[in-house]
Image: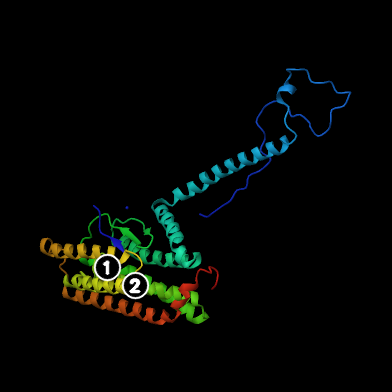
Amino acid sequence: MSSPPDGRDGFGWIGSSSQVAPAAGPPEVDLSAPTTEHEAPLAPGSWGDRYQLPPNSGQVRARRRGILGTIVAGGFAVFKYGFLLLKLGAFKGTLITMVISVVAYSIFFGPVFAIGFVLLLLVHEMGHYLMAQRLGQSVSAPVFIPFLGALINLRRQPASVQQEATMALAGPTVGTVAAWLCVLVGVAVHSEFWAALGYLGCLLNLFNLIPATPLDGGRVTAAISKWANLVGLGILVLYALWAFSSGTAVSPVIAIIVLFAVFGTISRFRQARLMPEYLAVPTRQRWLFLGSYLVIVLVAGLGVVKGYPYLHYVHTVHLPFSF
């Protein structure tokens, strides 16, 4: 899913060492052997009288050195891997928000399934990103929003609705292909994990193809007819009513999407009135977009049907390493 224009290491562990040299100071006192009669007693007020340590002083010093070593090692790790993160440039935000999304989805799906699901979202968004770059658009790296998916941000208005539709169609296309690969792997090796992951991927892309802005389907079908967004809004409203009445919807996400779709539909009709040249598409191109859109909808729908028998696995993926 792409947002409308606004104009957005590896892991390492370094252990602490007990060999860190102590800070400069008075010489250590050997407390391991008792004082004998041949040893001169310490004079009152001398260094030894002031700095004699308790019998467990060796453990205290070792613990202090260990804490200091941990702090130094942690600071070094932050510097080292923080520097590597800066090297990612625009994609450091992508990595950070991906990790946050994995943690959020792990609450419901378990960590391994959550990683697979977020990677499918990444493939979808990279389809948008790479197509936008190919068309010369200034675009942000993907940003993930837990339970809302992910988006890229166009920094300027596309030159035409054809350009907008082409970028929008690229995401579900590569996303559906990736999801189908998961389904095929699951069927081939009899893995419920892969089949269920592919099912959710196809379902995600199919939902995204509903012809209502800000979903990808609304941006694609805007190149076909402005009325398509009105149809898509009706589909979303009916789905939301069914989801809430049947108890399927357990979060306000669907309501948020419907709200955005209302504003998106109004914006499309306003755009048709104020910027008719933006929505001007040759008839041949309209048919091409319609055909491409229907093919992707059909392929994603078949993936949902093929993977549906494995849906029950989603309820067991809290056992994270059960492939």
Residue 53 as seen in the image, left or right of residue 186: right
Residue at the image point whose x is 15% and y is 68% from the top: 280
Q: Quadrant of residue 199?
A: bottom left
In terms of depth relative to the viewer, which is nearer, 154 or 260? 260
Judge whether residue 105 can be spotted in this image: yes
Q: Quadrant of residue 212?
A: bottom left
**Residue extending farthest right:** 38
Amino acid type at image mark 2: Gly
Judge whether residue 163 can be spotted in this image: no
In terms of depth relative to the viewer, which is nearer, 86 or 70? 70
Quarter of the image containing the C terminus?
Answer: bottom right
In the rendered structure, which disc, 2 or 1, sits on the residue that comes first in sequence? 1
The spot of residue 99 in percent (x, y) is: 45, 57
Please rate how many residues cluster around mark 2, counting C-alpha atoms within 10 Å: few if below 14, some from 14 to 19, many from 20.
few
Count of all numbered marks drawn on residues in the image: 2
Residue 72 as seen in the image, left or right of residue 157: right
Residue assigned mark 2: 247
Q: Nearer the viewer, mark 2 or mark 1?
A: 2
Does dot 1 land on a helix, a strand or a loop? helix
Quarter of the image containing the N terminus?
Answer: bottom left
Q: Quadrant of residue 274?
A: bottom left
The spot of residue 36 in percent (x, y) is: 87, 27
Q: Is residue 62 above or below residue 146?
A: above
Q: Is residue 90 above or below residue 194?
A: above
Does dot 2 land on a helix, a strand or a loop? loop
In terms of depth relative to the viewer, which is nearer, 304 or 222? 304
Residue 79 as seen in the image, left or right of residue 249: right
Amino acid type at image mark 1: Thr
Residue at the image point whose x is 40% and y is 64% from the top: 122
Residue assigned mark 1: 166
